[in-house]
Image (spheres, grey):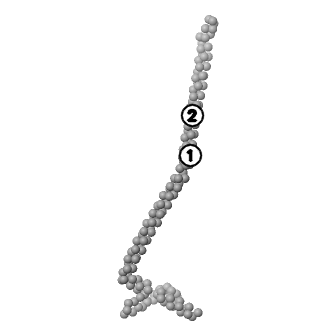
Amino acid sequence: MAGRNRDRFSTATRLRLLGEQTAARVYRSQNRRQARRSRLTGRAAFLALVVCSLVVALAYPMRQYVAQRGDMAEQRERMADAEAAVEGLRDEKARLQDEMYIRRLAREHLHYVLPGEAGYTMIDPEASPRSRTGNGSEGRAWYSNVWDGVDTADRR
């Protein structure tokens, strides 16, 4: 037994035991680190899966939301244009209630004259020869074109 005790306390034995214990500790710490790494990797993978699922789940509704916002802005713009057009028509309707405005339009567009006035049309020397000879409708009163059309139809 004395040999055994001596063997137990010998330097070589102590070094061998110390190496085995150290190797066991290193092995255990490596296993813990790998377990921790795999646990973190599993968590990270799950987190990535959740984030990707949320992105996929929210992508279509967000696209629809953005598209609808654009449509709403376009409709607001169209509504403002329509309101401006309605306001212009209301102004025109109010002007058409004025007799002087109606007379001015009749003079300008229909070449009307009041009783006692002499109506005449000036021929533009710069105008094309076709319109000066009466073959074209440029620069002529509307009623001249109507009568020319009636005369042409009568000749056929």
Q: Is residue 4 visible?
A: yes
Q: Is residue 125 visible?
A: no
Mark earlier in primary sequence (2, 1): 2
Q: Nearer the viewer, residue 98 or 44?
A: 98
Residue 155 rendering spot, x and y as whole percentages:
57, 94
Q: Secondary structure at mark 2?
A: helix
Q: Residue at x 46, y 87 (%)?
A: 141
Q: Is residue 9 left or right of residue 139?
A: right
Please give the residue where the numbered disc 2 appears in the rendered image: 39
Query: Residue 117 vs residue 20: left or right?
Result: left
**Amino acid type assigned to the residue bearing label 2 in the image:** Arg
Q: Which residue is mark 1?
A: 53
Is 120 rendered above or below residue 19? below
Q: Is residue 14 above or below residue 41?
A: above
Q: Where in the figure is residue 21, as x and y percent of width and height?
A: 59, 19
- In percent of width and height, residue 54 lies at 54, 46
Is disc 1 placed on a helix, strand or loop?
A: helix
Q: CA distance from mark 2 to mark 1?
A: 21 Å
Which residue shows up at 52% across the image and 55% down it? Answer: 64
